Image: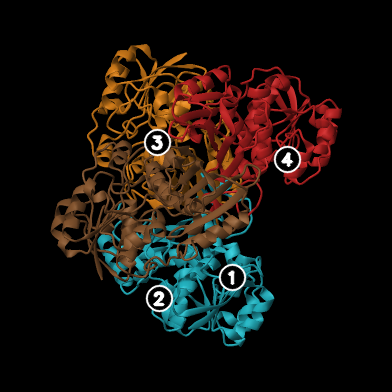
Chain colours: A brown, B red, C orange, D cyan
Amino acid sequence: MIRVGIIGATGYAGQQLVWLLHQHKSTEIIFLSSYSYADHSFSDIHPQYDRFLENVCINIQSIENKLHEIDLLFIALPHGKSFEITKKALNLGVKVIDLGADFRLKNPLSYEKWYGLQHSCINLLSASVYGLPEIHRKAIKKAQLIANPGCYPTASILALAPILKHGLIDTKSIIIDAKSGVSGAGRKASIPTLFAECNESIKAYGVGGHRHTPEIEQETSNIYGKEITLSFTPHLIPMNRGILATCYINLKEKQSQEDLYILYKDFYKDECFIRIRKNLPETKWVKGTNLCDIGLCVDERTGRVIILSAIDNLMKGAAGQAVQNMNILFGLKETEGLELLPMNP
Amino acid sequence: MIRVGIIGATGYAGQQLVWLLHQHKSTEIIFLSSYSYADHSFSDIHPQYDRFLENVCINIQSIENKLHEIDLLFIALPHGKSFEITKKALNLGVKVIDLGADFRLKNPLSYEKWYGLQHSCINLLSASVYGLPEIHRKAIKKAQLIANPGCYPTASILALAPILKHGLIDTKSIIIDAKSGVSGAGRKASIPTLFAECNESIKAYGVGGHRHTPEIEQETSNIYGKEITLSFTPHLIPMNRGILATCYINLKEKQSQEDLYILYKDFYKDECFIRIRKNLPETKWVKGTNLCDIGLCVDERTGRVIILSAIDNLMKGAAGQAVQNMNILFGLKETEGLELLPMNP
Amino acid sequence: MIRVGIIGATGYAGQQLVWLLHQHKSTEIIFLSSYSYADHSFSDIHPQYDRFLENVCINIQSIENKLHEIDLLFIALPHGKSFEITKKALNLGVKVIDLGADFRLKNPLSYEKWYGLQHSCINLLSASVYGLPEIHRKAIKKAQLIANPGCYPTASILALAPILKHGLIDTKSIIIDAKSGVSGAGRKASIPTLFAECNESIKAYGVGGHRHTPEIEQETSNIYGKEITLSFTPHLIPMNRGILATCYINLKEKQSQEDLYILYKDFYKDECFIRIRKNLPETKWVKGTNLCDIGLCVDERTGRVIILSAIDNLMKGAAGQAVQNMNILFGLKETEGLELLPMNP
Amino acid sequence: MIRVGIIGATGYAGQQLVWLLHQHKSTEIIFLSSYSYADHSFSDIHPQYDRFLENVCINIQSIENKLHEIDLLFIALPHGKSFEITKKALNLGVKVIDLGADFRLKNPLSYEKWYGLQHSCINLLSASVYGLPEIHRKAIKKAQLIANPGCYPTASILALAPILKHGLIDTKSIIIDAKSGVSGAGRKASIPTLFAECNESIKAYGVGGHRHTPEIEQETSNIYGKEITLSFTPHLIPMNRGILATCYINLKEKQSQEDLYILYKDFYKDECFIRIRKNLPETKWVKGTNLCDIGLCVDERTGRVIILSAIDNLMKGAAGQAVQNMNILFGLKETEGLELLPMNP
């Protein structure tokens, strides 16, 4: 049994992680911790867990005393909050999967620029592994510290990886227009995410400046082998869950849709969580699962390929991927605890 | 008083038109007609009109006998259904505003290609005016037949027009990623638009092949002066109303955001329904009105400008624009009956 | 022109009031005030007002200096916040319409019990008029201080008034099961009203103890002539606007549905905002208007009548009714500024 | 392994059943059948099943040839459609769980009255068992034919059963005000269940005449021991899933809330799917599970108890309960395949 602790357990991503780990056959939850709800029963905050989970959330201070009891620490905190606890955990030989943004960017200057914060664990950056298993599976196996990817980057990078490897595209042309449900904004009191503010409307936000941009660029550049600069625009959609990324790329030369479909099928042929679709993906088809559905369409008129990917932002975009990383890290079957059938409607 | 008839009055666009015309000071509704609900009281189909409107929908056959009683015929029918009645109306000297697609494309071969239907009124195409007042106001004033623009083209063309006129862009780079509420799909029984199919999901549709593409290309080409081919991708959003178009364009040379803002402000300075915004538009800010909100963001990293426009698809995207066209056509104040304040939440 | 000031203008009810008053032909807005957004431009908080309204929200302290400039003060604050300013306004001869709860209950002990707060303006209670025009029109005409009814009480009292007057019911049997959109919870940062908390769920709240209960009982008792105790249960529905009240009452003796329908039609025959419906009301049929739709169904099997009423909680349930009260108070046509056609979808 | 066939597999309830049975360890799906989609791959109709389920839906005619291959037939068809196939299956020794309404009412005259259809299998009615395990577990164990309860009756009967057994209530006073998500209306093309018709609105329907009324009365009468006539009013809520039933009952004499809470706790103490809550239930807390949450509130002012129950209409209200019945019928652990943790948000 893998003994795990979860910090930030009552947020949407944290809670989804609890959901998965509670049902996972090979893990034991040693503690849950919450900034906002320390000393509350977890099922008081999330009453759906009544009868299933009786843990009390411990406060942040108590975590240190518990670190020696666990094998793996999951952190689901806002950026800038993971540095200290990560250091302490690693020093004790506890592995860490950070669902936050603190260890995703390899370049500390980039972190500083985009997050407006100095990075206080620069020495850990080179050792940390960007936890997108379809791209970095080998490194994940040997990692001590895994930076779990952001939700938008997961959808975006998975959509782009095969064609980037293939190479025959104009890399200056990449545009990612992404749409997310409101749970992506987190579970904190705020007016812009009130029901009556989000319902019956759609908006873009962070245009030209969203923090997931450098993360997507870092990974796509690595895959392509040369530096890539791209456009990324997120939108807020009146639904609870789901991300759809619509990616536009100019083809260097003519490609048939069938050829690209085969390329994608082939690239992901051993991947259990990627489905290449003949029809266009819809977020409801992956809801509640760790799946990423990808579809593509060659537009001969414009010489462009449009690649669409759909994930559940709290699953493959956060907690599901964290569990997938854990499974790899601890030598379990990669799908353990993640064999979930999408539930509709 | 302008005496008007409305064909297709019980669909979502038709009904919105009835809503506007009923409250318009200078129009008198002579008849409403409906394929599906002939001989039904209009307020039986749309009970919100109880006490306000007591008309009975006449059947399609009865329209011909009524044509001589009206000055203006509005048609809100699916494509391919407007040809015959338009001819008859024009022959009697009745002006026509067609909210459908039958007279929007000047090139009948293009119509045939995209709509899979032969155009049976080719002779009317050259005389018909594409009813986007901000672009074609002068021609609208003198028109007999106005082709009211599609919802997506309205949002897209208005977003692109100023920068196209300006010229300093790479016209091969234009990408329009648009998002629409479900009312855009019309009021007809169908499984894909059921509540439980649309709610809590998002999808793209018609990728690379949506019929509004040639319409957008025709108009942007006219504005630019050279032929433009662009990408247009519509998405279905779980909300009733609203379209947001996110447009991506490569700048030929560096432009400051402020300069482009001023360019847009200036281009639309006399327009009563266009608001150029410092912040990014949200569809709720135009809900229930004929407004089009436009915002833009220069992304220096990529050399791209991202232009966002928001409209109410049933208003500026259909019925509101039809009334605006009517006002121009009959020499009324352009805002008459359209001085609507957006209602939130 | 009636010169008006609005306190609490940026909340959902306050903003709806601004919406109505801005378009009202006989009013001039002298000031808007906001606790949370003092010194902000109103259209910064509610960007849909851009171009329509350029007022800056004044702070609460500045109001006193402005009171002498107005004829009428609207207050849209949480309970307990209206006492002082109301006194000052009345002393200066300014009439007051309070959209909050502070002057609705005639019995200060009842106020204390249900609101957990001592009433500090007991002397004003007898003079204040409960502003439900369909019941208290005469008193409203002569009032200095109008307590605008709560949203649930408006729907409930209007549903029950005719049959209570009629008398032939078992008054111990009255049950009101009400459902409201989320805007009723107000525009303040809170977790329970976040999109992802409210969407895709329904719950009851305040069961057996909601503060609108004594208000409904006070008014229904007055109408009936004897004290009434009843059950009132509100529910939160994942939609922005609308209240549906489903009322259950045992009939003392058999009544036909047709007879009761005629009774209701007759009771409200001169009312411009009440529609008695043959079919069952839906909230969308009154959306965006000051209308109250009422339908009823006699269930012969149980000897019960079920009466349903639908209102827009921000209109007839708040701002619309406040304007209706203003119209009456100042001798205007009662429907002025309220001749709104419901907008769907 | 229990070999099962499913008729009506592509509807919302049928599909949810496929979801459960596909993941159930002790069942093998022998065939899926669909009226509307015969010869289609199941995952063409419900693309979320891609990779998980490759069955082709067989047509209704082919079922007969397949009956000898199965142990259990699930039928999820509209009422009036189950008679013939049920007879044939039972004759072959195949057990039947009918998710439709055809065998729920013991009295064929009642069926005829409420469903407007003659019952053509009257001889099967006495042998059929009403499949609400918490009430009829013993009979279910020995049944050949199980009538799976309706969604509203499940929520209603479970809410009322303990206090009915207890006896100290006025049985003439029972009122059930129920609210359901739109999936309850089924997956068929229709205008009233379109997104733009249901979203942003609430309505009651079938007031005084909904077909679930006699079903609730039959079962509550059996539990109480005397005939009960009650009021049942369903409402349509803009959400995909979930039923909340708010039940009002007059207490014959004073009862404390704590006593009733203990009574409920005790009544359901051995039930794995019933949670008696200290706080009020919300439908999201049971979403995606076979749970029924019940909360209650004694209103001393009115001498009434208000009992609230929440279920997932497609789970405990349909497919989940069908699997629970199967588990009992075949001697499996009752929770097998149903140990689901509610997923939020």
Do the dots labelled 3 and 1 sit on one chain? Answer: no
Residue C281 in the figure: left or right of residue D289? right
Depth check: give the residue in front, D140 or D264: D140
Provide residue A240's location: percent of width, then percent of height: 43, 50
| Quadrant the N terminus of chain B occupies | top right
How much space separates mark 2 and mark 3, taking CA atoms? Answer: 49 Å
Which residue position is annotated with label 2?
A: D336
Q: Are marks 1 and 2 on the same chain?
A: yes
Q: Give, as a three-letter code, the residue at label 2.
A: Glu
Residue depth check, mark 4 versus mark 3: number of the one nearer the observer: 3
Q: Can residue C35 be seen at all in this image of the molecule?
A: yes
Q: Which residue is mark 3?
A: A209
Residue C170, how many percent across, how many down?
44, 51
Badge 4 amino acid:
Leu
CA distance for labels 1 and 4? 46 Å
For the residues labelled 1 and 2, the Cα–Cα distance comes to: 35 Å
Is residue C291 found left or right of C8 in the rendered image?
Answer: right
Residue denoted by label 1: D110
Q: Mark 3 or 1, which is nearer the eye?
A: 3
